[in-house]
Structure formats: C-alpha cells, structure tokens
Image (cartoon, rainbow, N blue to C red):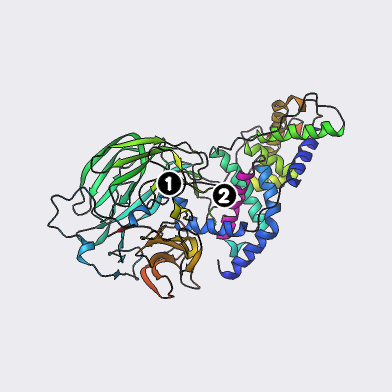
C-alpha cells in the first residue's frame, strides 16, 4: 500500500470503525475483545487489497460475516461472558421488565453458535432480506430460512422467560430445506 | 411482543452501548498486518532473538571437528552480501551475526479442509558456505557459534530434541523428553534450550471459506483457534537434564506461541494476545516482572535488545532507550531482525515505490541513511512460495 493508500485507509478506519465494531460486537455475542480481534482481522484483509476494493465498507462487512461463521468451524473457543442475571418475576409488560427481557435475550444470543447469531444479526440488525443474507454467506435462501427458524427456537429453549413471547413470522415451519447449515466456499 | 422484535431491540440496544474505538486503531491494524507479513502466522515467535546476542561457545560437539574450519570462520569479512540472491544461496553475514538458515512455508493437506503448515528449511552447510535444503526437520534453531542446531523431527509434537552438527550434518545426540515438544530456542550463551510443549501440532491449518489473500480463489488456510500449548522445558544442553513447567495462559493469540529466553538468559517469555502483550516466567514457570531493559521490547520483533543491553529495536525501525523507552533514532526498514553490533541492525526493507511485500535484507546504521543491501528481494505476495523467513545466529 502506498502512502496515499495508507492515508485513505486511515481515514476509512477513523470514519467507519465504530459502526463496524457494533456489528462485530453483535457477531461476537457481546465479547468486545473478540469483536476487536474480528474487526482487526477483517481490516487486515481489506488492507491487503486496498487498491482493488471499490466499496471498502461492504467488503469489510462481508469478511466480518464470513470470517465469523468460518471461525465457528474452526472451533473458535470464545471467552466466557459474564451475562447479568435478571431478577425474579420477569415477563410483565412494563418498561422495567422489557429491559430485563432484553438482558435475558442478550444472554441467550451469546449462547447461540456464531453461525446462528450471524444469521440473526443480518436479518434483524442489518434488516437484510433473506436473499441478501444467503448471498453474503454463500448459502441458499432455504438454509437462511431454516437457520433463522432454528435460531429463534433455540433462543426460546435457552431462556424460559422467552417462551411466552409470540411467534415470529420466521418461526412458521419452513416449507423446505432442512438440510444441515453449511456455508459453501 | 414477538421473539423477533425482542431480538431486534436487544441487538440495537447492545450496538448503541458500544464505546467507540480509540484513534489509533488504523495504526494497530497496519502494524499487525506488517507483523503478519514478515512473520507468517507469527510462528517461531521471537525464537531467533535469543541466539543473536553476545554468546560464548557451545558446550557440546566440540570434539572430533577441531581440525575442520567453519565456513563462517573462513570468511570473516565484516559484511558478506549477495544482493542478487533471493532466496539466498551463499553465506550472508554482517558484523557478529550470519544468516544461519531460512525457511519457506508449505501447506501439506491432510483432509479436504485440514492441512499442516510445514517449514522447508535451507540450512547453512558449514563446509561449503552454501544454504542447502533439508526436509528432515520440522523445526530448527541454531546455537551461537553456528556449530550446532537443535532440531525436531517431523510430525510435531516430538518426543526428542536432536543436536545437529552443522559441519558433518549428523545428529550427535538426542535429548529425550516426556512431553511433546514443537519449538526450541537456545539461550544467549547456547548453554540451555527452552522447548515449548504442545498437546497437539500447533502448525495445523484449517481451510477458510473466504478469499483471505485476495487472489480471487477460496483456497486459503488459517491457524487453529484452539490453544494446544501446555508449558515449557528448560534444558541444560551439556547434560540433557531439565525441568518442565506447566503454563496455562488463555491470553494467547496464536496456536503456536513459543517461549524464548530473555536477553540475559535468566528468564523465559511468551507473547500474549492482549495487554500486557508479553509475560516473563522464571525457570519454574512462575510469572515475573519484565526485566528493566525489556520493558519496551515487542515479542514479534526478533532483534529485541542490543548486545550491550542499552537499546531496543521496535517494529518500523524505531530504536529506543531500552530502560527509558525514549525513541532515540529511526532506521530505514520495516522489521528489525538482528543486531549486528551496538550500532547496526539487519532489517527487512522495501525500496521506495516497490511492492511492499518485496522486502530484502539490509544492514542499517543508527544515525546514517546509508543502507547495505544484503540479499535480493522477496518475490510474490504474502505467503507465496518465494517468501522466505530468515534465522540469524551469532557467527
């Protein structure tokens, strides 16, 4: 990378790294250290082909997602997380219990596999349609659908407090493709 | 409320809570990248640092070869350079150190998605003064004086350490070990070895499903993210006796994270993934503070502390006061590889305007812009077959 390229790279990181870090933290289940590692790796890869990337942010995000799911295959041993335990008696409809439910949900999200979490982040944080998620992860739309379905079901099973929540659209049984979740090269 | 709405709310709330990254993140990335480029997968760690210091003699393998002259003794020129050779074929040396060996990486596939990263060494033949390919060894470190190398056989981790005579090419002695060893490093005086123990091969690689090197092909590997390291032996070379210390450290970045000796040879250290970035241990495995003149060293920079113990060379060619950490000079070049004496360093350097991966070995002098080119430039991109990693030793 020449000096001009380095300057552009620094500028990009300065302007976009905090937004990218948010995604990385969610992908890492709230583990800030793992998220910084994940982002650093993605940016290193981006730096390696900086002169040839037209849309750096899209490129880095794609690496973030794919790196994360591939780490799962590498049996990435995530650091233990400390998740705040909610007080007894959650499940009401007031503001306090909504906040408690979100804490419970975070704990449950942190216990999903990185692949399951990645699909949920893409669907519900990035608000991407299933087809885009499939394209990013290199799998079929059916796989995205079935993974979403299983991930939401897993969240319910991880925390009894979530059992009372209504069914999401994605929780309707998918019409096809129950094949094992797999990311293709 | 539906479960998907709660997922959405929770994710958004978590995202907004993140404090922003510090202003130095881009530099951290660029530094980490440079580090990876020059030390593929950061293996070997600082293993070669220890052998480049001021050493005395190697206590074994003296007998039987007294009449023969080492190539590094036959040619005692201050600088022996081959700027046309990459990879090098003939002895390269400057001041007190010489290029003792170098290696390239090759992935040997084991299954569809698993491989072993294998080093292919070229070791200096002390009879001919040429670097010769050897496929016998999976890991090599060279003792000061360049008469002896510690070698490990294939299929890491191994149960014995060989002491190879560089004049005859024969293993003179084997040191058996109870626990599997996958990395060895000599102490600065050559009298001891620190051998890093692993419960599995730390050089295993797993195929990643994205284009890691940007060549348009999804055929790249990454190291295992399991941590197979278990501890280290400190072994007395003359007697072959040693003790093992268990080190269970979670804060380790690489599957291979070898131990090496401190500058004075009294402690061992290892790189860490996060602050404090390095940890020192006594020979019983107890954590100890950094030595006073190693507070500013970087584990991934091989050159480390100068022979007189007063300076430290850091990434990017910064030279600091070893005790105070004050920057006192900058030398041209990326990565300091070895101190040649108290004023000169061997570094990786790429010519202005040249591909940044195409670095060559140069000799730089503190306080001078003059560079002496010691080798030809690396070819190809990071990890390409033409990329070789040097190992220096005191000649």
In this view, the mark in front (2 or 1): 1
Please tell me in which quadrant of the rendered image residue B130 appears: bottom left
Residue picked out by circle 1: B269
Q: Residue B18 at what x, y percent from top left?
A: 71, 47
Inter-mark Cα distance, 2 to 1: 34 Å
Q: Is residue B372 left or right of residue B223?
A: left
Residue located 21% across and 42% down the image: B173
Q: Residue A96 at what x, y percent from top left?
A: 84, 33
Asked if residue A168 can be seen in this view, the reply is no
Q: Which chain is disc 1 placed on?
A: B
Q: Could you classify mark 1 by the number of other residues whose Cα lies within 10 Å: few (under 14), some (14-19), or many (20 or more)?
A: many
Residue at far right of view: A94
Main SS, magenta region, reads helix
- Of residues B35 and B282, the one nearer the viewer is B282
Residue picked out by circle 2: B210
Q: Secondary structure at mark 2?
A: loop
Magenta segment, which residues? A28-48
Q: Is residue B232 left or right of residue B316?
A: left
Q: Could you classify mark 2 by the number of other residues whose Cα lies within 10 Å: few (under 14), some (14-19), or many (20 or more)?
A: many
């Amino acid at each position: 990378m020449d000096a001009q390229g380095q300057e552009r790279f620094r500028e990009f990181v300065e302007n976009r790294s905090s937004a990218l870090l948010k995604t990385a933290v969610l992908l890492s289940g709230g583990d800030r250290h793992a998220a910084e590692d994940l982002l650093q790796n993605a940016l290193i890869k981006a730096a390696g082909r900086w002169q040839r990337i037209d849309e750096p942010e899209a490129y880095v995000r794609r690496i973030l997602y794919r790196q994360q799911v591939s780490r799962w295959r590498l049996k990435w041993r995530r650091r233990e997380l400390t998740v705040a335990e909610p007080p007894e008696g959650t499940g009401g409809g007031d503001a306090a219990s909504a906040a408690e439910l979100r804490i419970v949900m975070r704990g449950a999200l942190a216990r999903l596999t990185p692949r399951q979490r990645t699909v949920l982040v893409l669907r519900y944080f990035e608000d991407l349609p299933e087809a885009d998620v499939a394209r990013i992860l290199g799998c079929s739309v059916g796989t995205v659908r079935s993974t979403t379905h299983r991930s939401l079901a897993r969240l319910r099973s991880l925390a009894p407090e979530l059992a009372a929540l209504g069914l999401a659209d994605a929780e309707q049984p998918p019409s096809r493709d129950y094949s094992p979740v797999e990311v293709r090269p | 409320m539906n479960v998907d709405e709660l997922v959405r709310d929770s994710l958004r709330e978590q995202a907004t809570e993140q404090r922003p990254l510090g202003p130095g993140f881009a530099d951290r990335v660029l530094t980490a990248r440079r580090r990876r480029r020059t030390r593929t997968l950061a293996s070997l760690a600082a293993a070669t640092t220890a052998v480049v210091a001021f050493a005395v003699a190697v206590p074994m393998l003296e007998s039987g070869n007294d009449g023969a002259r080492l190539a590094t003794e036959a040619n005692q020129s201050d600088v022996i350079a081959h700027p046309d050779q990459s990879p090098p074929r003939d002895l390269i040396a400057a001041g007190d150190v010489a290029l003792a060996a170098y290696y390239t990486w090759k992935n040997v596939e084991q299954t569809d998605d698993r491989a072993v990263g294998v080093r292919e060494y070229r070791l200096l033949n002390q009879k001919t003064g040429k670097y010769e390919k050897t496929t016998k060894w999976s890991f090599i470190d060279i003792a000061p004086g360049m008469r002896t190398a510690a070698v490990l056989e294939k299929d890491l981790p191994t149960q014995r350490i060989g002491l190879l005579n560089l004049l005859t090419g024969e293993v003179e002695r084997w040191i058996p070990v109870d626990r599997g060893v996958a990395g060895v490093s000599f102490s600065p005086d050559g009298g001891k070895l620190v051998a890093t123990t692993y419960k599995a091969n730390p050089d295993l690689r797993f195929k990643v499903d994205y284009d890691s090197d940007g060549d348009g092909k999804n055929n790249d590997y990454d190291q295992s993210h399991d941590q197979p390291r278990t501890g280290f032996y400190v072994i007395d070379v003359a007697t072959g006796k040693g003790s093992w210390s268990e080190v269970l450290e979670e804060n380790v970045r690489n599957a291979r994270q070898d131990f090496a000796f401190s500058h004075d040879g009294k402690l061992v250290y290892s790189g860490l993934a996060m602050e404090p970035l390095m940890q020192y241990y006594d020979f019983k495995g107890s954590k100890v503070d950094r030595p006073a003149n190693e507070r500013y060293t970087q584990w991934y920079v091989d050159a480390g502390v100068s022979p007189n113990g007063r300076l430290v060379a850091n990434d990017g060619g910064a030279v600091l006061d070893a005790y105070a950490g004050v920057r006192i000079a900058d030398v041209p070049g990326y990565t300091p590889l070895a101190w040649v004496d108290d004023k000169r360093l061997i570094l990786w350097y790429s010519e202005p305007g040249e591909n940044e991966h195409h670095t060559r070995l140069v000799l730089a002098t503190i306080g001078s812009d003059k560079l002496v080119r010691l080798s030809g430039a690396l070819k190809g991109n990071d990890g390409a077959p033409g990329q070789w990693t040097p190992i220096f030793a005191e000649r």
